[in-house]
Image (cartoon, grey):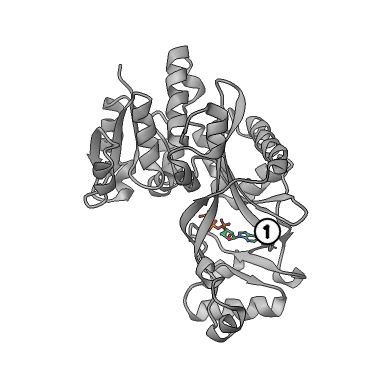
Amino acid sequence: DEITIATLGSHTSLHILKGAKLEGFSTAVITVKGRDIPYKRFKVADKYIYIDNFADISKEEIQEKLREMNAIIVPHGSFIAYCGLDNVENNFRVPMFGNRKILRWEAERDLEGKLLRESGLRLPKKYNNPDEIDGPVMVKFPGARGGKGYFVCSSKEEFDAKVKQLKERSILADEDVEKAHIEEYVVGTNFCIHYFYSPLKDEVELMGMDRRYECNIDGLVRIPAKDQLEMDINASYVITGNIPVVIRESLLPQVFEMGDKLVNKAKEIVPPGMLGPFCLQSLCNENLELVVFEMSARIDGGTNSFMNGSAYSFLYHGEPLSMGQRIAREIRMALELDMVDKIIS
Ligand code: ATP
């Protein structure tokens, strides 16, 4: 029977659906009125499933529609956020590309840290409480807040002053402050590395890299330091876009080693492991070490920077391949080899 590749209309859905069409699949987008315009204009969806609001994605009737279409769902960051992790794990009974059990390992900071550390990757040094601060640190708070309220400081006194200020502005609550995560501020250049692990080929492919374009920090750095001092603006790190980037060639062995290490450890800790796309968000310091501050265990938003292929996906495949198309190609290969159970959960 004909398979439909489906996803929620948000995040990376444009190239997921476009890629599926290029690989010969039928496509469906789940969307709400008013948010369907990009899919219509770019003509990437064959079918539209309308819901009243994004949170309705987990409803039984939507799952029923998807099953009737013989759908495989491609989960992305917004899909998981709106469906809810518990629902994704236990109640969303539609075949899903990848290993749905690994999604919790990116969502919970402790699990994420455990997987990255045990994989042998370099992480920013973690401070257990503000008294230990002995140099520049980045302070993060729980929840998907897009970097809102995050701040940089260099001492306990500065920590207290900034927390007080953010509480006064109602950006932080007391319970957030208790859960503050304090880590070494890595001065370096940003590389978000997009990998694809093919369970069919048992190989990790380097698909592309981006760096983040964040508000207000990327605007703030355009203001001369003396004016910044007068303006008294708090930095924030709200993602607003992505910029494609390539890394100096001598760092590529490190890049491949990091992807391989994570894939090997994930097979052991969360079998069957990290299937399909994943991302390591890193900062390269002046010693040319890639320090990983975050991971995505599914397609990352930064893959939007190479919808028409990246330098690396071109090197690998000899054609301008997006991550979305790479996913669809794995599904097509699995169907041909009668190995679909290897790539879905
Ligand atoms: P996401 O939506 O990517 O999950 P988030 O809210 O979890 O975002 P992070 O990605 O952890 O936030 O951090 C936001 C930004 O802050 C990063 O893109 C990077 O620019 C900066 N950053 C994070 N950690 C560090 C660090 N240890 N040192 C220096 N800069 C950092």
Q: Nearer the viewer, residue 85 or 187?
A: 187
Occupied quadrant, residue 240: bottom left
The spot of residue 316 in percent (x, y) is 57, 29
Depth check: 27 or 67 in front? 27
Quadrant position of residue 155: bottom right
Give residue 199's position: percent from left, percent from top: 56, 24
| Observer-nearest of 242 and 181 | 242
Whole-percent x and y of residue 308?
Answer: 43, 38
Count of marks placed on residues: 1
Q: Residue 2: horizontal and vertical position, in percent?
A: 30, 19
- Return the residue found at the far bottom: 230
- The residue located at (62%, 47%) in the rendering is 112
Depicted 28 relative to depicted 141: above or below: above
The residue under the point 23% across, 52% down is: 34
Tell me if residue 331 can be seen.
Answer: yes
Find out if the beta carbon at label 1 lies less than 8 Å from the nearest ligand 1 atom: yes
Please rate how many residues cluster around mark 1, counting C-alpha atoms within 10 Å: few if below 14, some from 14 to 19, many from 20.
Answer: some
Secondary structure beneath dot 1 equals loop
Residue at position x 43%, y 35% from top? Answer: 324
Report ligand 1 position as a quadrant: bottom right
Whether residue 276 appears in this view of the structure is no
Is 42 in front, or is 248? Answer: 248
Please, what is the three-letter code of the amino acid marked with disc 1? Gly
Q: Which residue is mark 1?
A: 188
Please determine whether, in this image, residue 158 is positioned above or below residue 51. Answer: below
Q: Quadrant of the N terminus?
A: top left
